[in-house]
Image (cartoon, coloured by chain):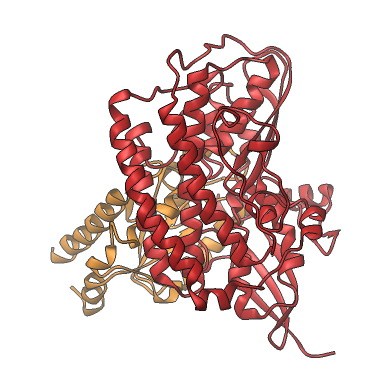
Amino acid sequence: MSFKLKALLKSPWVFHLSTGSCNNCDIEILDCLTPRFDIERFGMLLAPSIKHADVLLITGSCNRKSATRLKRLYEQAPKPILVVAIGECSLSRGMFIHSYNCPLPLDKIIPVDVYIPGCPPKPEAIIAGVVKLIGKVKSKTKK
Amino acid sequence: MAKRTIVPIGPYHPLQEEPEFFTLTIEGEKVVDIDVQVGYNHRGIEKISEMKTFDQIPFVVERICGICSTSHPFACVQAIEDINDIEVPERAKYIRTIVGEGERIHSHLLWLGLAGHFLGYNTVYMWAWKLREEILDVMEILYGNRNNYAMFKPGGVRRDIKDEDIPDVLKKINSIIPTLEMLKKAVMDDPVLHARTKGVGILTKEEAINYSALGPTSRASGVTKDVRKDAPYAAYDKVAWDMIVTQNGDVFDKAVVRVLETFESINIMKQCIFNLPEGEVDANIKSISAGEGIGTHEAPRGEVFHYIRSDGTNTPIRHKVRAPTFMNLPTYKATIIGETIADASIILAAIDPCYCCTERMAVRDTKGKKLYGGEELIRLSQEKTEKLRAKYV
């Protein structure tokens, strides 16, 4: 495991990005930070800028206006960056699949590492997802 | 003329969880102009709604906004019922009121927490959100999910409230009242919070009326406007409650209105649970005839309005939604200009803006003039489609 990745997995800083979501997933992400769930226990912090982030949490159905910004943000992010798609909208666009403003699912725009389904996923599910992501990266690098 | 600087905020920034883009023009420390650009959240819900049957539409409008996931279906089913003058069973009306008020409690607590966060009071943020979890637990007991309850259907509610759940719910609700009292005292007596919010971002009564501000934004300015009192629906005329109105219109008063409304909501919710009548919860509508209907509901942020036109088939031919933030957003022109840049974030947050509710229209408007007309928007949209197609395919 590279030094960079090892440091990253110890305390992943998350950046949260809404690409046209209904706010529910975003609120559940914020819920993870508040006393009942408190993901700071695991060293996770909400980063104020993508340039400080190790994990990119994406919610929403990627509409036309935010898709271009999403690409730009992904390019700005320091690599390696891990991408987590949260909620049904970012997985498959959910009920917005027929919308004129949501042309492509998220994983056709940028590569995604972990998908967390649910509408909205519960905070427990989000935490479990990020923990699985860390496990996945660790097992990959061991081989 | 002093040197002017433009401060861009957004579209992706830690201030709020939703994407929006503010351009503040400042002279020294004073904000002299503001421009809001939206559209990062547009998903074309009104168009999707026209593809769905009347039974499916409540699920679609629920996903307009996660915080208002009761308000939109509430107004929407009332619009559908208005087409045929359908009478909803009493028990369903009470259950609807319980759902609506529960949402108001968690939404106001959410705002209080975020406002504390913007002011640098992260303790308020953590306390308010911790309290909010209790309300979400109540939601989970009653409706099976923390958000997106899927309780509404035209003609009634989808699920009944079970009697064995009620003791647990009452226990949870009663348990949050003392903590909420404490939080109220902590917020209202704090000298630093007073200094930061009193006399900041004042919206006068005249301005509130001229801008047609809605909900707590208008009630904080002394306008007595509340759909629940003005045109009672569901069970709001059968329970005793007060409309909270304050006079100053500053950020502090907006906070006070919200905190006090939380207590009123708990009051309404408890009265509804105690007086829950027996009977059916669904009127079992078979078909919707041709016609048009409107439905309104006092969402946590103000009046939400739904218009539905039906041609006698099982899908609507037009569905129009107007969310409260759409009316409250222009009040920034009155509140933020002349204030300092440091107060900008709390003033921007004071109306409790909700962009995912608002963004089903894409015409931007600055200083009263339209940047893009309808035709130009369509042309731009088509060009962008072409560009995107070239990029992605």
Q: Is residue B356 above or below residue B2?
A: above
Q: Give coordinates of residue B386: x percent, y percent.
A: 67, 50
Judge whether residue B309 can be spotted in this image. Answer: yes
- Please name whichever residue, B81 or B4, is drawn nearer the observer in this view of the structure: B81
Q: Give coordinates of residue B323: x percent, y percent.
A: 66, 44
Identity of the residue furthest to the top in this view: B286
User: Residue at (71%, 47%) from the top-left corner?
Assistant: B224
**Colour chosen for chain B:** red
- Please name whichever residue, B360 or B277, is drawn nearer the observer in this view of the structure: B277
Q: Give coordinates of residue B143: x percent, y percent.
A: 38, 32
Identity of the residue furthest to the left in this view: A143
State left or right for residue B293 relative to residue B374. Answer: left
Judge whether residue A57 can be spotted in this image. Answer: no
Q: Quadrant of the N terminus of chain B?
A: bottom right
Q: Is residue B259 above or below residue A75?
A: above
Q: Give coordinates of residue B285: x percent, y percent.
A: 56, 11
Q: Is residue B372 above or below residue B335?
A: above
User: Residue at (38%, 50%) from the top-left corner?
Assistant: B177
State left or right for residue A121 relative to residue A51. Answer: left
State left or right for residue B231 relative to residue B89. Answer: right
Residue A31 appears in which quarter of the rendering?
Answer: bottom left
**Colour chosen for chain A:** orange
User: Residue at (69%, 74%) from the top-left corner?
Assistant: B24
